[in-house]
Amino acid sequence: MIWTIYKKELIDSLRDRKTIMLSILIPMLFSLGMVFFYEAFFFNDSPEKYTVAVENTMDDETYTWFSQLDSLTVSKVTDPIQTVKDGEATIALYAEVDFLDKIEQGGSPTIDIYVDQFSQKGEQATSTLNTHLNTFKEAVQQKRYENFNLDAEVFEPFQFSINSISESEEDASSFLLSILAPLIIVMSIITAGIPTSNDIFAGEKERNTMEALLMTPVKGTSILFGKWLTVSTLSTFSGILATVMFVVTTKFFTEGLTNVIPDDKVVSFIGVMSIGVLAFGSLVSSIMMMLSLLANTVKEAGNYTSPLSILWMIPFLLLMGVSVNELTTTHFLIPFFNIFALIKQLIFGVYSIESIGMVVGSSILVIAILFLLGSFMFKKDRWVLGKGA
Amino acid sequence: MIEVNNVSKQFKEKKKTIAAVKDVSFSISKGEIVGLLGENGAGKTTLLRMISTIMEPTNGSIKINGIDISKKTMGIKQKIGVLFGSETGLYDRLSARENLAYFSSLYGISKHETNVRIDQLAVRFGMKDYIDRRVGGYSKGMRQKVAIARTLIHDPDIILFDEPTTGLDISSANMFRELVHQLRKEGKTIVFSSHIMEEVKLLCQSIIMIHKGELVYQGDIDELYKQEESEDLNYIFMSRLVRGA
């Protein structure tokens, strides 16, 4: 009987083309578009040029010096700040008259820089200009120490450097993918299951088909299981499809991200990810099932399930700043957190049976609890028949 | 034989308890056609839901052929066919054939037997031309035929119709009445709720009247005419409601 119900529900759901398009294909295409966007944004080889607006009165020597700095285009204007406000330059720079000449003469002229602190581009431009000015400042200091026969080391009692433990540029790519992959995969799982779940529980109550179904000599648990299996199948299928599409896109259509998942790990990645997707998809489906059972109409079910499509962002955001070696057992035991932890591990090339076991085990436990609760609710006519009952 | 003994049903809504059916008792003999009369909200649907096993009474018991339906639910379900409303219980994205086949398989009927029954029902209800088209595109009358066919797919002995002709056009309603006559000839026990007195008068041998969840009358329709010295069922119904007994 479970198979009969499952087969019917699956056919019924797949015939709803609009829902399939809106809940599976469009979110997936949108997500994959994000991969291209991220790559274009973070792996852009051509350095960006920033426009620096300076006063018309700037002397030629100073203007020429600024103009030859890398990544900067200097433009003389009447009002540099207004030019930045108008969006025609990124930085407004005011240098003292005869800036270079005064330095040459041992003076200490000033430079005032104005930038929109909420602009990312402004921040990057300031950082670039800051680097150039510090380099120049150090060169001038060195020269002045020499002029006074002083040892520069006297004025620098110690030196230190901060280095990354990341071995290669691929770690940056892995970090980027560890943000993108959960977004794409988890979103695909959730969006694919919601319409079907709303339709086959709350929708059946609304259309009164649930009554006809309950009139048949089929156990409530079989109906519940058959329907849940349908939602799980669609969620899991969507998640696995998203995983495959994600791997194919990064491997074949990107340059900066292509080596994050090595060629010999592609099958393992998809395989292990599929287990995680199956566990998470089944878990999410049982939550959706419960929410849909609580509702009397599809609209009401939509009200209950829509927060789910936002709430998953909480574990995602909480784990975003956690590095792969900071992940603990707790992360893998808490449902919803664990799928993000697992994806992060896999992106960084860590394949741990313990982690997968914890993800699957904790999901099964929660699913079993929700099923017991769902079976109880399915026996009560106020839940199974809706408000009219 | 249906025996309803002191059945009550209460619903809890927020902090209030609403009694939908209050201590109702009646019996229906095999092969009888009974009209269940009552205003909207009188408790007709709740009563039919309890007889059809999909809702449990708060108090009392219901027996079908001497078997308590709460104890042999699955077996009883095989004997009952229910149609709530005129066109419910259908899946719009499935064809009529797929709808019927689905319910047939849920009743445990073999594939071969299902196909035979679907073909018979298609002929009986004149559905052959559209049986393979999706139900979503059907007219109200077409949907009603499929819904009735679904109710009869497992050849039940007892058939419960809840307001089956509400919202139907004249020809569809006539088709339904003709069907009830045919089913009567086949020896089926039929209970149908309605608020159309003429329909009840035409089809039923006996009636059950309920008002605000309480039984107002149960018995032979001709006996009721004699008691009230009138054959105007509308008038009788209203006067019974006023008297409350």
Image (spheres, coloured by chain):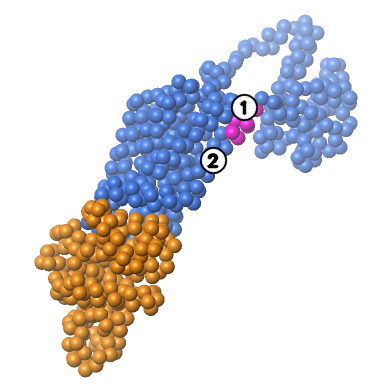
Chain colours: A blue, B orange
Tell me the kind of residue under disc 2.
Leu
Q: Position of residue A93 (x, y in %)?
A: 79, 31
Question: On the picture, is A130 further left or further right than A292?
Answer: right
Whether the magenta-drawn stretch holds residue B39 is answered as no
Chain bearing mark 2: A
Question: On the picture, is B96 further left or further right than B225?
Answer: right
Q: Which residues are magenta?
A: A36-44
- Which residue occupies 75% across, 18% down? A137
Tell me the kind of residue under disc 1.
Phe
On the question of residue A386 being in view, the answer is no
Q: Position of residue A12 (x, y in %)?
A: 39, 52
Reading the image, the residue beneath label 2 is A29
Residue A281 image-quadrant placement = top left
Reading the image, the residue beneath label 1 is A43
Residue A293 image-quadrant placement = bottom left
Q: Secondary structure at mark 2?
A: helix
Question: On the picture, is B149 further left or further right than B141?
Answer: left
